[in-house]
Image: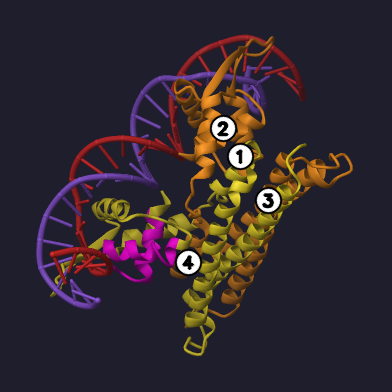
Chain colours: A yellow, B orange, C purple, D red
Amino acid sequence: MALDHAILVSLLEKPGSGYELARRFERSIGYFWTATHQQIYRVLKRMEGEGLLAVRDVPQQGRPDKKEYSVAAPGRAALSLWLHEPIEPESMRHDLAVKIRGAAFDDPAALVREVERHHQVHSDRLAHYLAGERRDFTGPEAPAPLDAGQELQHVVLRGGIAYERMTIAWLDDVLATLHRLGATPPSA
Amino acid sequence: MALDHAILVSLLEKPGSGYELARRFERSIGYFWTATHQQIYRVLKRMEGEGLLAVRDVPQQGRPDKKEYSVAAPGRAALSLWLHEPIEPESMRHDLAVKIRGAAFDDPAALVREVERHHQVHSDRLAHYLAGERRDFTGPEAPAPLDAGQELQHVVLRGGIAYERMTIAWLDDVLATLHRLGATPPSA
DNA sequence: CGCCCCATGTAATTTGTTACATGATTGT
DNA sequence: ACAATCATGTAACAAATTACATGGGGCG
């Protein structure tokens, strides 16, 4: 049940409403953890009931009121507990790899467009990460001595950057392989 | 519903029982797709009902009988259909990244052991992948001209290798960062 | 005798996804 | 007028996880 913990971390970094959390899960945090607003609202309600979160009604003008959630003491304790227990090195769900192996039983050439599309998506993500890195950590606007929280956010971002670069290079490899198979007619 | 497709690919590569599939999902395929035996049995039954798979009862001596599943014609068609429709570039569930950002609100040094443990797991996986690559693709025992299926399996394996190398390098970066934070007392 | 491997499943619970629903404000 | 953004949810359904359950054979 790690969505709970992702929410705790995000709310510790900055309190916010369910809607705001959902938006964050589409950007920064969402790069290594996804969740939709329906899921988030459900979990927020449960966690509030468990006393892990505190709510504050924030009236707004020109906009619907919102409920601002923040982490209560028991929530902090729950996070600390989780941080101290080991977790499984994550398992992947890599659809594209399944498709590539499946292509052996169909037409490999038909995958080229799909792979190119993924290549584009990952290139865009990389550009986005790099822009964020310049903005928040390495650019002239960034705070000179970073505090612990910023250092940790930066190292996570570097992980995202490394992941995208690796993926792009691999997709190039996949494309080259597909082209090689296309050049050599599949008669084997 | 991509477990269906992962099963189709695996059974096309080689027919087998639910138990055997579960084992494969712990090894080769499992590196980019995970599933437990409970899940697999349920899906196999459903797919058989849908006519996508064929079953054959295989009596064995000294062992419980097994049901060997193989892909029926409609299953092949279903796979082909899936291969031709675009899929979303996958979203991640990276617990460790959540932990790292969470560590800012706890003791970052406490994460060192956890990160080292992950480092070990990924190093082991890399070694295992490399051994598999030598055995099946680059070693002297491997078939000299690989067919299309083998080329595709190889490029997927290269992806796994690239992923593990990237992850190991990143975990080194994480460890260095954690040590740097430990060296500089968190007074900021 | 106990543990692991083979082989199959059921049941309960928790998560995650998809679709539907409401309603005000701002911008084109 | 229409679409997008902010803000919150419910309901139905699909999928994944965890626990429980059974039973023979081989190994130390």
Q: CA distance from mark 2 to mark 3?
A: 21 Å
Mark 1 or mark 4: which is in front? 1
Q: Which mark is residue A178?
A: 3
Look at label 2 and name its amino acid.
Leu
Chain containing mark 3: A
Look at label 3 and name its amino acid.
Leu
Look at label 4 and name its amino acid.
Arg
Q: CA distance from mark 1 to mark 2?
A: 8 Å
Circle 2 sits in a helix, a strand or a loop, which is it? helix
Pick the residue in front: D10 or B147: B147
| Residue denoted by label 2 | B8
Query: Which residue is most to the right?
Result: B140
Residue B58: % across, % down: 63, 12
| Residue denoted by label 4 | B101
**Do tags 1 and 4 sit on the same chain?**
no
Look at label 1 and name its amino acid.
Gly
Report whether B140 appears left or right of A167: right
Q: Residue at x 76, y 43 (%)?
A: B132
Residue C26: % across, % down: 19, 77
Residue B145: % across, % down: 83, 42
Circle 1 sits in a helix, a strand or a loop, which is it? helix
Q: Residue at x 56, y 42 (%)?
A: B33
Mark 3 or mark 4: which is in front? 3
Q: Which mark is residue B97?
A: none
| Residue denoted by label 1 | A102
Report whether B166 appears left or right of A85: right
Q: CA distance from mark 4 to mark 2?
A: 39 Å
A22 over A142 or under it: above or below:
above
Q: Residue at x 53, y 31 (%)?
A: B77
